[in-house]
Every structure is written in C-alpha cells, then in structure tokens.
Image: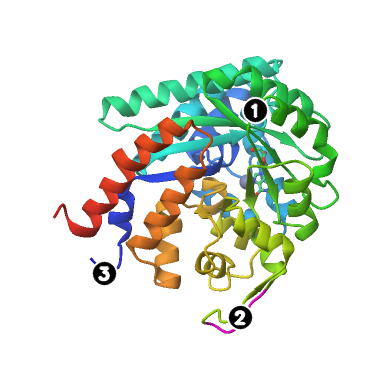
Amino acid sequence: MDAKPTLEQIRRAPKVLLHDHLDGGLRPQTIVELADAAGYTDLPTDDPEELGAWFVAAANSGSLERYLETFRHTVAVMQTREALERVAAECVEDLAADGIVYAEVRYAPEQHLRGGLRLEEVVEAVQAGFAEGVRRVAHRGAVIQVRTLLTAMRQAARSREIAELVVRYRDEGVVGFDLAGPEAGFPPSRHVDACTYLRQQNAYLTIHAGEASGLPSIWEALQWCGADRIGHGVRVVEDIEAADEHLHGARLGRLASYVRDKQIPLEICPSSNVQTGAAPSLEAHPIHLLHRLRFRVTVNTDNRLLGGITLSDEFAALVDTFGYGWDDLESFTVNAMKSAFASFDERLVLVNGRIKPGFAQLKWGGR
Ligand SMILES: O=c1[nH]cnc2c1ncn2[C@H]1C[C@H](O)[C@@H](CO)O1
Ligand SMILES: [Zn+2]
C-alpha cells in the first residue's frame, strides 16, 4: 500500500480538476486546423508538434504578463460557434482520458466576440461542446461531469455583465464566476460590484489572487469580494513564518490564519506557478508547506497546453518531488471535490461513489 504511485496508476485514479482554462488547453493540431479555417496567419508555426513546444517555451517566461501573451493565438482561433464547440468537446475528451471524473472549466466569454457572436451565444456554444464531449466519452464507457466557470478579465470592465451571465446560466451547467488576467495593477476591489451582485444571488465565485501580487490581493479577494475559493493563492506563504523543517513553531499571520481556519480552498497549479515565476521551482513550491500545515490544498493544471501537462502529470511530479503517496493524492482530490461549486448532493455522490472506492482500489487492489 505504501508503494510509490506510478504515472499509469495516477491516470486511473478518479481525479477532480477545479482550475483549468478552456483557452489554455487546446490541442496543437486543433489550433493549426482552426487557424487555417479562420485565415489566421500569425501562428509561430503550422507544425502541431513544434507549436506545442512553442507554447511551453513561450509560457516559461517567469512573468505572468508574458505567459498571458500566448493566449493571443488560442483566443484568435476561438471566435466562431463551431470552433468553440469543437474546443469544448475535445477538452472533455482530454480530461476524461486523463481519468478526471469532475471538472470545472473556465474561460472569458468577452474574449470570444470578435467573430460577431453575442455573450449568450458564446456560452451556449461552449455548453453544447461540453455536452457533446460528455456524450462521446460515454460511448467509450467513461463518465465525467463537467461544469463551467465564466471568467471576467480583471483589466477590462465587464465583470458585472459576466456575473449576470453566470446567474442567467446557473441551471445549465454554469456554476460560478472567476476573475483572471494580469494581477498587478488590477486588484479584485475593482470588481466589488460584480462580486456583491453574485453573493446577493447566492452564486459562487473564485478569484485569481496571490499569484503575481501578494497578500493585499488575497485579502481583497476574500474580504472585499467574498471569494469562495482562491485561484493559486500561493503567496499566502508571505504571511507565514516558516519554522524549522518539522514545522515546529510555524507562525501564521492574521490572513494566513483566516485562510486556514476557514479552510478556504486554494486552487494550486504547480507547473503554471513555476512558469510565471510565482514559485521559484517545484522543489521550492509553497504547496508542500501549505499541505503540511493542513490548508485546503487542491491540485490543478491551469493551462494544459502552456504547461505541456495533464493533471496526472502534476500529481506524478508532486510524488517525485515530495514523496507523496496515495493518501496525499486522495486528500487533494477529496479537498477538490468538497470545494467544488456543484451541489452538496452531487459532491457527496462523487466522493463516496467514485473517489473513495477508486483510491481504495489503487491502494489495496480491492482487498
Ligand atoms: O494563471 C493565470 N492567471 C491569470 N490569468 C490567467 C491565468 N491563466 C489564464 N489566464 C487568463 C488568460 C485567459 O485568456 C483567461 C480566460 O481563460 O484567463
Ligand atoms: Zn488560471
């Protein structure tokens, strides 16, 4: 039971993904084909393999702003109903192939209007694509639940509209709101109006914070905006005085204490954090400290294309780097399922009906 989980076993584990961007997870081949269909000629290369490598190299920039520049190409080819449907359906196929049983996938509808679509049409195209993907994988015997988060770009001024869109489509698979984009200079408090509206509607929100900016950003996301979860949040460690390696005498400031005491879910994306410079390396990534201090840590991909990774790869890298075993991986997974924006009933069924039995099988081989 204590054997080190292998990548192949991790792929079979029933996993949960809360933080994955639709426009950061396209297949390189699809980008090439959609660019061709749309007459988009700015791709750095037309060779899918080279293009995949280009994204990873360009995203390895050490800066969130430069990391975000790469989205120019993916967003450019996601401007029609057909393109959005295709990308959404393939996303579901790729997540299911990686053994994910529940995913919340996010994107910013306001970035997909250049081809003349309205916000509602963008949402409906993506929902249709997700439904198609779920049907396709069901034919192959896989069961996956996919829900949607609608992102507002923090440097723009459409967050209230996007919040209204979340509420409008809440019964059709949209389970929450997100704020993303460059963090420095665009604090969460710019979007208090949208966040207040969401809470008054009993809707859920997560906010990217504590990635390129530090504690004030996390504090605003929680205490001005009422975020239910934090995207990344890794810089909460700036409020922790790490003691010795055994954590004797670790001291948490008021904000870090609040995050831990209330078990605010942290959507941690290890590879992405190293790529943007939010963490110096995987070895030095705050996830290890936060996990040992029993923060509510979840593990996520952020952008599979930009990282050249899957969720299973992220888990396997944590196993290699920190010596994590099945209990750690199960705890990240149960944390994620508990923190999902799906209803309590749905979460319970997945935890008790799929996650616990699936991990038990891997740990004990069905004993
Ligand atoms: O890690 C991130 N931080 C901030 N913004 C991000 C990150 N990953 C993706 N985005 C942005 C770029 C996408 O175009 C947008 C919507 O998915 O969200
Ligand atoms: Zn993100």
Asked whether the viewer can see residue 235, the reply is: no
Mark before the other along the chain sequence, 3 or 2: 3
Above or below 80: residue 295: below
The residue mark sitting in front, 3 or 2, is 2
Name the disc covering residue 2, or none. 3
Q: Residue at x 42, y 21 (%)?
A: 132
Segment tinted magenta in the rendering: 241-245
Q: Label 2 to label 1, Cα distance in Å?
A: 39 Å
Disc 2: which residue:
249
CA neighbours of label 1 inside 10 A, class few (<14), some (14 to 19), many (20+): few
Tell me the quarter of the image containing the N terminus.
bottom left
Callout 3 secondary element: loop
Q: Label 3 to label 2, Cα distance in Å?
A: 29 Å
Q: Residue at x 49, y 25 (%)?
A: 86
Residue at the farthest front position: 261
Pointers 3 and 2 in contact (CB under 8 A)?
no
**Left or right: residue 124 compared with residue 187:** left
Callout 2 secondary element: loop
Q: Label 3 to label 1, Cα distance in Å?
A: 43 Å
